[in-house]
Image (cartoon, rainbow, N blue to C red):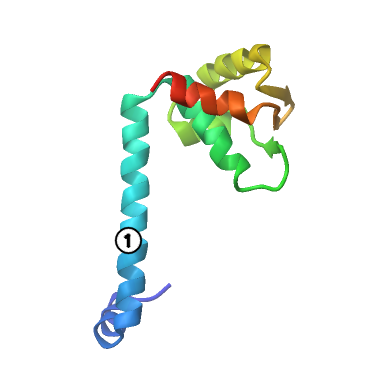
């Protein structure tokens, strides 16, 4: 944490620091805009597939330690809707579910869901 006065001085005296903070702000603003766009213009199964693939990219394993409630919070819907959609993914063979875990079985299938409805 840095106070506002120190931050201002840092940005005024260091073009490297200012550039870094500009880039950081730009990246975060872009990510926020993407999230809003996804929420408004994609289906639940697309948002869920995208989220699972994105989370999978942040881990070295095919198993995500996530509850349905946490997933729902991240993609902006209800836990019940996430559960229904995940069970559809299970029937399609894309994932398998155990308590608190989601194992990704078919990444290509999940990618297909994102592209098919686009």
Q: Residues within 10 Å of mark 1 (few under 14, many from 20)?
A: few
Q: Is residue 107 left or right of residue 98?
A: left
Q: Quadrant of residue 1?
A: bottom left
Please indicate whether residue 24 sits to the left or right of residue 59 in the image: left
Residue 99's quadrant in the figure?
top right
Q: Quick one: SS at disc 1?
A: helix
Q: Is residue 117 visible?
A: yes
The furthest residue to the bottom: 13
| Camera sees residue 78 | no
Q: Please give the name of the residue rendered at 34% of the width and 70% of the height, measured from the top-left corner.
A: 21
Residue shown at 54% from the left, 17% from the top:
80
Tell me which residue sits at (31%, 83%) in the image.
Answer: 10
Q: Is residue 88 above or below residue 109?
A: above
Up the image or down, 59 lies above or below 79; here it is: below
Instruction: Pinpoint residue 23: horizontal percent, then vertical percent.
Output: 34, 65
Residue closest to the far right: 98
Q: Nearer the viewer, residue 97 or 46?
A: 46
- Return the x and y of residue 107 as percentages of the image width and height: 62, 30
Q: Nearer the viewer, residue 51 or 115?
A: 115
The number of discs equals 1
Residue on which disc 1 sits: 25
Horizontal and vertical percent for residue 49? 53, 28
Q: The C terminus is located in which quarter?
A: top left
Residue 65 at x, y percent in the picture: 69, 38
Q: Residue at x 42, y 19 (%)?
A: 117
């Amino acid at each position: 944490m840095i106070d506002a006065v120190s931050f201002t001085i840092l940005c005024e005296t260091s073009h490297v620091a200012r550039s870094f903070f500009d880039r950081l702000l730009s990246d975060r603003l872009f990510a926020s805009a993407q999230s809003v766009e996804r929420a408004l213009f994609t289906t639940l199964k697309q948002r869920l597939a995208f989220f699972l693939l994105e989370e999978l990219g942040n881990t070295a394993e095919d198993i995500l330690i996530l509850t349905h409630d946490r997933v729902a919070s991240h993609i902006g819907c209800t836990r019940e809707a996430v559960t229904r959609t995940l069970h559809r993914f299970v029937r399609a063979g894309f994932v398998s579910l155990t308590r608190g875990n989601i194992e990704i079985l078919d990444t290509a299938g999940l990618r297909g869901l994102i592209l098919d409805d686009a």
